[in-house]
């Protein structure tokens, strides 16, 4: 078990995927990040009084027609870094299937989420826990039956007071920038090597609403 996050992986196994600097710095920052999350960025003490609703902040569609199960096997569950990813990666992740923990790093800082593997391995449902410094409403990862594409739907708890909390948005922008950097820049070599295309869309529901309004 890797303190303080738990799970079945050791610190060495996490370092093999994320690097020792990420593991060490994240351990040092862990208590500060917990305070940041619970008291400042996503105030738990306010959530009981003024609950926040969810909005879909980002959707990502991966297509890999010539490499079945590519994203699941090479990005999500492989304990080794995916070849072709340049540094800084911006974003990286590793799923601990046995314990249901989603390890994720943004710009070299680890966070963890609880993960439910859907029947038949058809996808994941990812939820925040008290150790998560980046809070999400349940995220859905959905694989097609053929294993040639998958969609990621990221929901953010910002319908409420979080919408006007600048610290919430600083945290969201920090994580989103790392993820977008990965999709557009650092994973470009990996995408070319494997015939992968990744299409991110920020606030897709908002843009669908605007498009529908234009048609009307």
Image: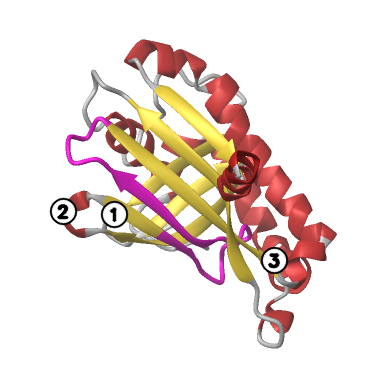
Check residue 146 for magenta coloring: yes
Badge 1 marks a residue whose secondary structure is loop
On the rendered structure, is 71 left or right of 130?
A: left
Q: Disc 1 designates what residue?
A: 97
Instruction: For marks 2 and 1, give the one nearer the viewer.
Output: 2
Q: Residues within 10 Å of mark 1 (few under 14, many from 20)?
A: some
Check residue 136 for magenta coloring: yes
Of mark 1 and mark 3, the one earlier in the sequence is: 3
The region drawn magenta spans 126-148
Q: Quadrant of the N terminus?
A: bottom left
Of mark 3 and mark 2, the one earlier in the sequence is: 3
Q: How is the image coloured?
A: secondary structure
On the rendered structure, is 132 left or right of 12?
A: right
Residue at 17% across, 35% down: 146
Badge 2 marks a residue whose secondary structure is helix
On the rendered structure, is 78 left or right of 55?
A: left
Numbered-mark total = 3
Q: Residues within 10 Å of mark 3 (few under 14, many from 20)?
A: many
Which image quarter: residue 33? bottom right
Q: Disc 3 designates what residue?
A: 37
Residue 106 horizontal/vertical position (percent):
61, 42
Residue 112 horizontal/vertical position (percent):
50, 57
């Amino acid at each position: 078990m890797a303190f303080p996050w738990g799970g079945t992986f050791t610190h060495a196994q996490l370092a093999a995927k994320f690097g020792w600097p990420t593991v060490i710095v994240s351990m040092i920052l862990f208590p500060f990040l917990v305070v940041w999350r619970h008291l400042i960025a996503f105030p738990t003490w306010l959530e009981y009084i003024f609950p926040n609703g969810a909005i879909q902040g980002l959707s990502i569609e991966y297509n890999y027609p010539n490499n079945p199960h590519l994203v699941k096997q090479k990005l999500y569950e492989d304990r080794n870094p995916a070849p072709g990813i340049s540094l800084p990666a911006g974003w990286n992740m590793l799923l601990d299937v046995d314990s249901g923990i989603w390890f994720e790093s943004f710009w070299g800082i680890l966070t963890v989420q609880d993960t439910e593997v859907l029947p038949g391995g058809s996808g994941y449902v990812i939820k925040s826990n008290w150790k998560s410094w980046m809070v999400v409403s349940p995220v859905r990862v959905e694989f097609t039956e053929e294993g040639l594409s998958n969609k990621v739907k990221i929901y953010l708890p910002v319908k409420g007071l979080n919408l006007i909390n600048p610290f919430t948005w600083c945290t969201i922008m920090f994580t989103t920038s790392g993820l977008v950097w990965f999709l557009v820049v650092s994973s470009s070599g990996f995408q070319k090597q494997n015939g992968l295309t990744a299409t991110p869309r920020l606030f897709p529901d908002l843009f669908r609403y605007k498009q529908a309004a234009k048609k009307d």
